[in-house]
Amino acid sequence: MTNKPNLYNLTKSEEDYLKALFQLLIVDSSVKVGNNQLAEYLKVSPASTNNMVKKLKAKDYIVSEKYGKLDLTDEGRAIAVRLIRKHRLWETFLYNYLNFSWDEVHDVAEQLEHIKSYKLIDELDRFMDFPKRDPHGEVIPDADGEYFVLPKTRLSSLSEGDVCQLISVDDGSVQFLKYVSKIGLALSSRIKILEIREFDNSIRIEFDNTIETITRKFADHVFVKKVV
Amino acid sequence: MTNKPNLYNLTKSEEDYLKALFQLLIVDSSVKVGNNQLAEYLKVSPASTNNMVKKLKAKDYIVSEKYGKLDLTDEGRAIAVRLIRKHRLWETFLYNYLNFSWDEVHDVAEQLEHIKSYKLIDELDRFMDFPKRDPHGEVIPDADGEYFVLPKTRLSSLSEGDVCQLISVDDGSVQFLKYVSKIGLALSSRIKILEIREFDNSIRIEFDNTIETITRKFADHVFVKKVV
DNA sequence: TAAAAAAGTTAGCTATGACTAACAAACCAA
DNA sequence: TTGGTTTGTTAGTCATAGCTAACTTTTTTA
């Protein structure tokens, strides 16, 4: 593996596939990630994914056997981490300096992460004084490509009576993020699980002197650290 | 003409062609700009240009008759001005906040100008407190698309004894910009034409207590305001 | 364990935006 | 004014990256 993978040789599409695969692999590294799953995540057809995977295997960014599960090479992973670093630094910049709201940063960062310039991103990092977390609470990988994934628990996996602290939220959906802001949840919030209703899997939670009922689906996108 | 042309419908290539045509037209609005000239400027084949011009005519951004000269519609011009605004604001940001040098800003700004977000660029403008000039001295068009081209004189067009002030420099060539910095010319410099040598068209100039001999080609890329 | 379902692959099509080669129109100059 | 040069156009090719439809392999489950 080269120390500085050459980002300059990749198309926007190639970058998108590598980043997507990385994010699927990170969720649960023991479970197989397949072609169709990657296709669904990227909202393209399985045929398109198959083509691109072939191309990225030829370039030694992906490894897989025919009909087998997909994995990244060290270089493929390094490229993905660098993209995540760029994405999160831009989100932080937009949020902290350009008055973007929680739910507005993602789409623009999705474009900005493809800008090719090592200097740009390292200077942006310095300008913001090397932030550690993005606006959604996610860890920003550093310039060396080190990326420590914190052990995250989904709010949906806790039990009645548990108390936890909000660590991060999924930044994929604008509707979800708007909803998070609307009910008043913030990164610092301490949340108590009051009740889990078996009937419809809805969860009653208390935070910052507020009581809310949230759905299971909502709780799946909220990541927390258990406190009690 | 719509008040806010929809930048979101244009590809990067389409944007590049419109901006290039605008910049060719602005140099001398009375002289014809043709297909091959546009091709040469963009460093693509005349056939590619012909194709793209056809497409942009169909979208009502360009007007021209077969075998005739090219011109922009109001909407085409508005898109080009918006791109120039974005380019120059990004150059200013890179130069003033991210430690980029004069000659490094252009290539990255060339990528950043294609990011699609109205909010991004207007907030960047506000963040920098609405700068009027980019690092090369060029006027930054405002959010309404107003773009006043200042009457610029090429340093090469002055006569012996003339005194002028440096207004702006061409930002197209890295070599040129490095050379400008190296000899110590800056945007504020007051330049006196000491001598023009008929033999090889070289020009002897004095500025900031320095005397330099520059070529005609160099002087073609330096824009000034005559003082005396 | 065999049939059905799911997952993966292949072939062949489309659009974009490059390219070259060949040709046509316009312009200029002897 | 006519012939050569410059400029513009067209036809046909290529690569990227998407698509559908058809097919194959693997996995699941009855």
Image: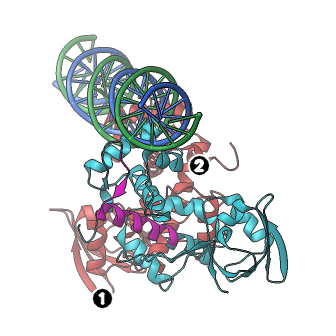
Chain colours: A cyan, B red, C blue, D green
Q: Looking at the image, which is closer to me, A55 or A148? A: A148
Residue A200: x and y in percent read 79, 58
Residue B192: x and y in percent read 33, 78
The crowd level at tag 2 (other Cα within 10 Å; few <14, some 14-19, many 20+) is some
Q: What element carries label 2?
A: helix
Residue A147: x and y in percent read 42, 75
The residue that mark 1 highlights is: B209
Report whether B215 appears left or right of B151: left
Report whether A56 appears left or right of B120: left
First in residue order: circle 2 vs circle 1: 2
The residue that mark 2 highlights is: B7
A187 relative to C11, above or below:
below
The quadrant of the picture occupied by the N terminus of chain A is bottom left
C3 relative to A131, above or below:
above
Residue occupying image coordinates x 30% and y 88%:
B209
Q: Looking at the image, which is closer to me, B201 or B112? A: B112
CA separation in Å, label 2 and label 1: 48 Å
